[in-house]
């Protein structure tokens, strides 16, 4: 009996050593632990930009101009496990989002206990801030309690923002930006710079 037990234990130990050796050998051969990006990608990964910046994202104002509220509502269905959106709706794991566009960040929502990370942001939810938030809540407010990873597609974010706006906010959408035109802030700064130059 002892011989049989020793034989089984020996073969089990031998199999473990062989498995460990193969794992180490294949890891070294395929460089499984390297932390830099491969020279040639095997397949495209959605949401990962190409080196050199990749395609420039379309301005949010343009995406909002052609946003589909129905698609936004469909995408928002993922959010209903934590959020309600009806007027006077109860808070769930997340706050009620009725009338969120234009609402103070980390305030309101019927006494919902927002994280300090979100309360410290200050300001009000506008289209650009909602876009940043929906892209990556953790990047927007490090330390937030929201576990949602974010939406990588700008079109999905625009559709959801348009849907949220239609639910009690109805804030006028920003005017679309013409291709090649300067952003609104730059355009507003240009006449002021011209006027100051003329005054000198």
Image (tube, helix red, strand yellow):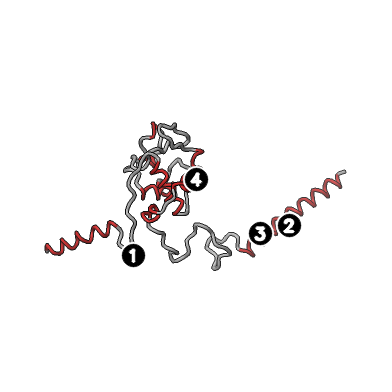
Residue at the location (46% across, 38% down)? 83
Q: Report the Cα–Cα distance between label 4 and label 3.
A: 47 Å
Residue at the spot of label 1: 180
The label on residue 18 is: 2
Q: Looking at the image, is 165 positioned above or below residue 93?
A: below
Nearer the camera: disc 1 or disc 4: 4
Q: Looking at the image, is 54 positioned above or below residue 137?
A: below
- The image shows residue 118 at horizontal and vertical percentages of 38, 41
Nearer the camera: disc 1 or disc 3: 1
Q: Report the Cα–Cα distance between label 2 and label 1.
A: 62 Å
SS state under label 3: helix
Q: Report the Cα–Cα distance between label 1 and label 4.
A: 33 Å
Q: Report the Cα–Cα distance between label 4 and label 2.
A: 52 Å
- The image shows residue 3 at horizontal and vertical percentages of 86, 47
Of label 1 and label 4, which has the lower sequence position? 4
Residue at the spot of label 3: 24
Q: Quadrant of residue 43?
A: bottom right
Q: Identify the residue at the far right of this view.
A: 1
The label on residue 74 is: 4
Q: Identify the residue at the far left of this view.
A: 200
Q: Report the Cα–Cα distance between label 1 and label 3.
A: 54 Å
Q: Are marks 1 and 3 in contact (CB under 8 Å)?
A: no
Q: Report the Cα–Cα distance between label 3 and label 2.
A: 10 Å
Sort mark 1 into few (<14), some (14-19) or many (20+) by Cα contacts within 10 Å.
Answer: few
Q: Are marks 4 and 2 in contact (CB under 8 Å)?
A: no
Residue at the location (63% across, 60% down)? 27
Q: Looking at the image, is 172 positioned above or below residue 179?
A: above
Of label 3 and label 2, which has the lower sequence position? 2
Sort mark 3 into few (<14), some (14-19) or many (20+) by Cα contacts within 10 Å.
Answer: few
Nearer the camera: disc 4 or disc 2: 4
SS state under label 1: loop
Of label 4 and label 3, which has the lower sequence position? 3
């Amino acid at each position: 009996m002892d011989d049989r037990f020793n034989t089984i234990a020996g073969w089990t130990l031998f199999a473990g050593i062989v498995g460990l050796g193969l794992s180490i050998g294949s890891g070294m051969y395929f460089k499984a632990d390297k932390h830099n990006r491969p020279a040639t990608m095997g397949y495209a990964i959605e949401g990962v930009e190409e080196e050199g910046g990749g395609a420039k994202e379309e301005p949010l104002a343009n995406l909002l101009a052609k946003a589909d509220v129905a698609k936004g509502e469909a995408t928002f269905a993922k959010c209903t496990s934590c959020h309600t959106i009806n007027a006077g709706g109860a808070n769930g794991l997340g706050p009620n989002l009725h009338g969120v566009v234009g609402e103070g960040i980390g305030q309101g929502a019927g006494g919902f206990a927002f994280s300090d990370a979100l309360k410290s942001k200050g300001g009000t939810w506008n289209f650009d801030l909602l876009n940043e938030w929906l892209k990556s809540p953790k990047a927007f407010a490090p330390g937030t309690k929201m576990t949602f990873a974010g939406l990588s597609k700008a079109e999905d974010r625009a559709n959801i923002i348009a849907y949220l706006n239609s639910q009690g906010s109805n804030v006028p959408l920003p005017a679309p930006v013409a291709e090649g035109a300067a952003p609104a802030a730059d355009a507003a700064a240009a006449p002021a710079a011209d006027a100051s130059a003329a005054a000198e």
